[in-house]
């Protein structure tokens, strides 16, 4: 069964993105609690590349499928989970990378949507926040995706966000999206 082609983010309005998000049905991984079965021998690199036994997974459809059964455990670890098994997966940073940005409006009426490296769409807002974290190699922006899973915002996308925030010339460097304000100045 072939997977549907990914829509082009640039051609979608934010209302169309909202409709696509509402229609998306992910497996209920938060409801599945099988016994831990072992290690998947899989790893997600910092750049979002998925590996199995040391080799990159080249089929996008496989990565998209695996990403739909990915879950973050209360201890911060990541697992691939089905109704009958749970396998550990190593994640170097965040399991996703936000690689593309769509913005409509400005100021408090702005809405931001992101495409992830897996093709998923995420609208930033109260349930999907943007946060800037200080790391040993400098500040890095992250987007909440779902259930404790995050996307590292790609550098080029972060630059787009910062340019928009600086152009708005507000009291704080940051952006609104869907009614929530996200500071991008590193202060909470």
Image: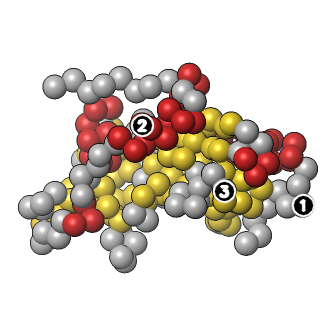
Q: Is residue 26 above or below residue 19?
A: below
Neighbours of disc 3 within 10 Å: few (<14), some (14-19), many (20+): some
| Residue 61 image position (x, y, % from top left) | 28, 32
Q: Kindly identify the residue that appears in the image at 67 percent across and 37 percent down.
A: 103
Viewer-nearest residue: 36 or 11: 11
Give the quarter of the image for residue 41.
bottom left
88 horizontally vs 185: left or right: left
Q: Is residue 47 above or below residue 135?
A: above
Neighbours of disc 2 within 10 Å: few (<14), some (14-19), many (20+): some
Q: Kindly identify the residue that appears in the image at 44 percent across and 38 percent down.
A: 19
Q: Kindly identify the residue that appears in the image at 40 percent across and 72 percent down.
A: 76
78 horizontally vs 112: left or right: left
Q: Is residue 52 above or below residue 185?
A: above
Give the quarter of the image for residue 65.
top left
Q: Which residue is mark 3?
A: 179
Q: How is the image coloured?
A: secondary structure
Q: Kindly identify the residue that appears in the image at 54 percent across and 27 percent down.
A: 12
Mark 2 or mark 3: name the one nearer the start of the chain: 2
Secondary structure state at the residue bearing disc 1? loop
Give the quarter of the image for residue 71.
bottom left
Q: Which residue is mark 2?
A: 20
The circle on residue 171 is 1
> Looking at the image, do the residues carrying marks 1 and 2 touch, with CB atoms under 8 Å apart?
no
Secondary structure state at the residue bearing disc 3? loop
Secondary structure state at the residue bearing disc 2? helix
Viewer-nearest residue: 57 or 114: 114
Viewer-nearest residue: 96 or 170: 170
């Amino acid at each position: 069964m072939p997977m549907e082609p990914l829509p082009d983010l640039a051609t979608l309005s934010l209302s169309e993105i909202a409709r696509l998000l509402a229609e998306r049905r992910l497996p209920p991984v938060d409801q599945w609690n099988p016994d831990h079965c072992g290690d998947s021998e899989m790893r997600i690199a910092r750049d979002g590349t998925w590996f199995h036994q040391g080799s990159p997974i080249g089929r996008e459809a496989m990565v998209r499928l695996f990403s739909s059964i990915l879950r973050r455990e209360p201890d911060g670890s990541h697992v691939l989970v089905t109704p009958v098994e749970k396998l550990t997966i190593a994640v170097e940073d965040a399991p996703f990378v936000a690689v593309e940005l769509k913005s409509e409006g400005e100021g408090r009426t702005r809405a931001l949507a992101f495409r992830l490296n897996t093709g998923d769409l995420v609208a930033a807002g109260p349930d999907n926040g943007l946060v800037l974290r200080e790391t040993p190699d400098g500040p890095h922006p992250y987007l909440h995706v779902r259930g404790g899973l995050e996307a590292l915002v790609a550098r080029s996308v972060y630059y787009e966000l910062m340019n928009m925030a600086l152009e708005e010339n507000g009291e704080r460097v940051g952006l609104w999206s869907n009614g929530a304000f996200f500071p991008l100045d590193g202060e909470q």
